[in-house]
Amino acid sequence: MGQRIDIFSQKAGAGDIAQLHATDNGNVMMNALPRDSRNRWVNVRDQDGYYVIPYQITGQFDSEEKSIIVGAMQRIANNTCIKFKPASGERDYVEIQNKQNEGCYTIVGRQPGRNVVMLEANDMATCVEPDIVIHELFHSIGLWHEHMRTDRDQFIRVHFENIPSYYQSQFEKVTPEETTSYGIPYDYRSVMHYAEDAFARPSTISMETMDPKFQKVIGKAPDASASDYGKVCIMYGCGQCMGKPFDEKTFVSSLNGVSALPTAPPVPTRPPIVPQIIVEGGGVTDGSDCFDLLSPICSMVSSGNFFFSCSSSLTSRICCRTCRNMATNDSNGRGSSLLGLFGRL
């Protein structure tokens, strides 16, 4: 098995958010899908009441790697009401792939048809580690990154001055309209949290915890936390969670009762994101030119796709030229928000 892949700095600007990979289409979703989201995996249920996510493993993995993947699936089944089962002709399914130089990434939530979970594994590099696999599977189930929560500024300071401009989209904060945390307090120990130096320039940090004792904790979780499992259980309405009868109000109250919220100092002003933008083909622009970074997504933006809108700052950056043209020709902008459906570690 190769060296562990640093999922916090795989490809320029990409992270583990699939829609930022030029080889895949998609949207983005934030902290957790709403409980009524049509992108939850609720179309198939077994006789025991578990929601079923059909999957195929098409990538080449050795026996140890397969054991880690299946083990992560089993931990999720043991602690939620979701099971992964081998696909048998279902329309919507997860396909676990292994391609060299692709790293680790997936979609947040269910999309029609094939939903790729990319787990690169070879003699040189690997994503197949227990925490990475469960992180990616949680994305597929519907969880996003902890550090992008609406309330994150109370718990971390993002040092944008230490983050190259083409990585700064990995630290976008989302609005309450685009996400929910179900009242669960911010969790430094979440397996969905980035590490302190994620995407930072050498010898610097990208995130500083307001409570110093958690500075070396973030991004180091060996497994999912209770809050990670709890979000999934609330999202899917599980009657059992983490091996016990589950009541949402009792669970959320217990977490809020134990977690002391650190007091936040004033939030620093974010510097403008202008200097360099990576464009298709590997080129760079200083922002004076306006490019579409991902043509397939931008085509959907211009066609009025339901999930995409130039009102989203992330969409307007990815589809600069399309959004500029649409603003000229049609001041109304169409669709929902690009901040709607993908993720990575």
Image (tube, helix red, strand yellow):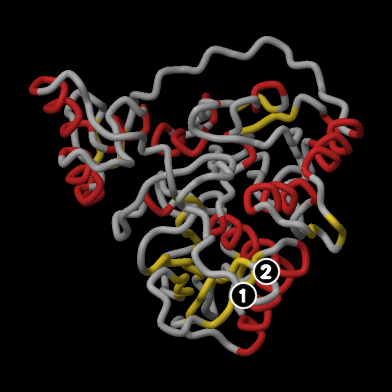
Q: CA distance from mark 1 to mark 2?
A: 5 Å
Q: Quadrant of residue 134?
A: bottom right
For numbered disc 2, what is the local secondary structure? Answer: loop
Judging by the rendered image, the residue that carries numbered circle 2 is 49
Q: Position of residue 90 (x, y in %)?
A: 42, 76
Q: Within 10 Å of the Cα at label 2, are there few (<14), some (14-19), or many (20+) other Cα atoms?
A: few
For numbered disc 1, what is the local secondary structure? Answer: loop
Q: Mark 1 is on which residue type?
A: Asp
For the question of whether residue 283 can be seen, the reply is no
Q: Position of residue 16 (x, y in %)?
A: 49, 53
Q: Position of residue 1 (x, y in %)?
A: 61, 80
Judging by the rendered image, the residue that carries numbered circle 1 is 46
Of the pair 109 and 52, the residue shown nearer to us? 52
Q: Residue at x 52, y 61 (%)?
A: 41
- Locate residue 249 relative to residue 183 in the image: left or right: right
Q: Mark 2 is on which residue type?
A: Gly
Of the pair 165 and 106, the residue shown nearer to us? 106
Q: Are marks 1 and 2 in contact (CB under 8 Å)?
A: yes
Q: Residue at x 65, y 27 (%)?
A: 152
Residue 3: mark in rendering? none
Residue farthest top in this picture: 266
Of the pair 332 and 30, the residue shown nearer to us? 332
Residue 287 against residue 48 in the figure, above or below: above
Q: Residue at x 36, y 38 (%)?
A: 338
